[in-house]
Amino acid sequence: MLREAGPQEWIFQECKKLSEMTFRFKDREKPQVYVCSVASRVFLYPMEELLAGPYLLHEYKPDIISELLAMLTPDRIRIAKVGKEFENICHETEKWYGTKYRLDPIKEETLECWKAAKLHPNLKLPLPNDLIPSNFDLIPLDPDNPKFPALIRNTKLCRLWFKQDDQFGLPKASLNFEIESPMAYVDPLHYNMTHLIVQLVKDALNEYAYAAELAGLSYVLGNTKLGIFLSIKGYSSKQHILLQKIMDKLTTIQICKKRFDILKEGLRKCLSNFRAEQPHRHAFYYTSMLLSERIWTNDELLNCLDEITVEMVQQTIPRLLSRVHIEALIYGNLNKKMALELMDIVENTLIKNMDSKHLMPSQLIREREVQLSDGCHYVYEVTNEIHSSSAVETYYQCGVQETRANMLLELLVEIINEPCYNYLRTQEQLAVPDVLVVPRDFELLFSLKNHQHLLMGGLKHLFSILINIYKI
């Protein structure tokens, strides 16, 4: 196919643009990693090209490309097959590592068959990538740009928070949309179906997502208790194209039964295999389950999975998106007008394809978390029949969220982390500590994982560290 089409200059120019973009806006690396990377290029590039050598393309040379393509013939091929099933037929042994191997020439008739093969009609060169950024200019900063994200649209259907970047100075933006729907978590059945809808949309977008990744764009699509979450990050120039593509696919997808069966089986395995997860994963799961106002367990999700059919999921999509509320945050190299246009893409696509209406005010009330009374303490024990290791998770509820309190809690975690890890892991090797803040719940978690007889010692030392810090 490549030989018949011949060298294509537009492909070279596309690769050149991508390489220049990657080099120009390359993220900062760890010094040690970067030094090793640069040092490895000393024998490959002249000194003046040491930094940019692997990234920048300069000349289009079709004759060299044609020469290389002419060498890609069946009689130059080498095929390696690796597997335990070949152990009995491999009679030679590699000198240094003792690996058994065998060398066989490819049969002449096989080579002739490969040489005579015709081009398959379905094999074609890719189309030009319409997501490659064309504009890297920074949007002039609004003199009234607020210090924090501001609410620039507030309707019955949506709320849009926006802030123009005034810190990083990069032609990038972050788009975040939460499409809230009560249907998404009304029962275990609908939660499973919402999950499958999201996975099917992502599966259908795989090819397009690869083109987006090459162009410096990425997206996250997932289901939550509130509904469907969509986040797009990367160069702001062509984000609107990717956003429109995702919204179109979400609202017009026709489900392929074969792909549905594969993804449904994948969900079944994920739910079934949870019991084999590490104890510290179970500890976090059960803590969330005990403190949530409403949560469907993995067993409940698994029990209703069999009754889901492709027809049910297809019919659920319009019901899921018929009544929604959109909460959005946009930040980056954009102005207010551009942010509103991006919000219009989401709203208009939902209204056009799904005839979406707004939720009632009573449907916008968020679920609560169980409030623990002052001075109380509870213990919840679960037996893990698979792993010999154990885990303990200690949970401290810190009250209602507030900006200053959030900051102080984050600071406390920074202070606690080092002495906990240094003593429990490095000095005593009692347990692996994990100290973190869960921002939405405003809570402090201490997680320890190790064998049971070591955990008690780890807990005692953990609490002694906390007491000492409290005294300070």
Image: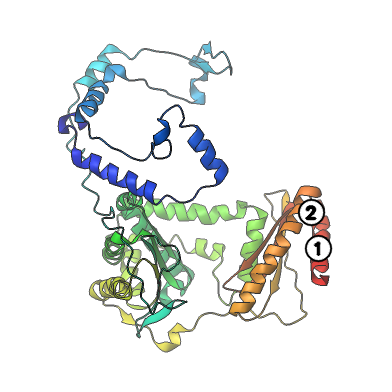
- One can see residue 242 in this view: no
Instruction: Report which residue position mark 1 lands on.
Output: 465
Residue type pointed to by label 1: Ile
- One can see residue 412 in this view: yes
- Vertical arrangement, residue 87 with respect to residue 421, above or below: above
- Quadrant where the C terminus sits is bottom right
Q: Is residue 299 left or right of residue 27?
A: right
Residue type pointed to by label 2: Tyr
Q: Quadrant of residue 414?
A: bottom right
Estimate the x, y position of residue 116 in percent, counting from the top left: 18, 21
Report the number of numbered marks: 2
Query: Given the current orientation, which residue lies at the most extreme front position?
Result: 48
At mark 2, the secondary structure is helix
Query: Given the current orientation, which residue lies at the most extreme bottom position?
Result: 361
- Quadrant where the N terminus sits is top left
Instruction: Report which residue position mark 2 lands on.
Output: 423
Q: Is residue 138 left or right of residue 229?
A: left
- Vertical arrangement, residue 55 with respect to residue 399, above or below: above
At mark 1, the secondary structure is helix
In the rendered structure, are the residues bearing label 2 and label 1 in contact, judged by CB atoms less than 8 Å apart? yes
Residue name at image x 37 percent, y 49 percent: 24
Q: Residues within 10 Å of mark 1 (few under 14, many from 20)?
A: some
Give the camera-side residue of 296 and 122.
Answer: 122
| Spatial CA span between label 2 and label 1 | 9 Å
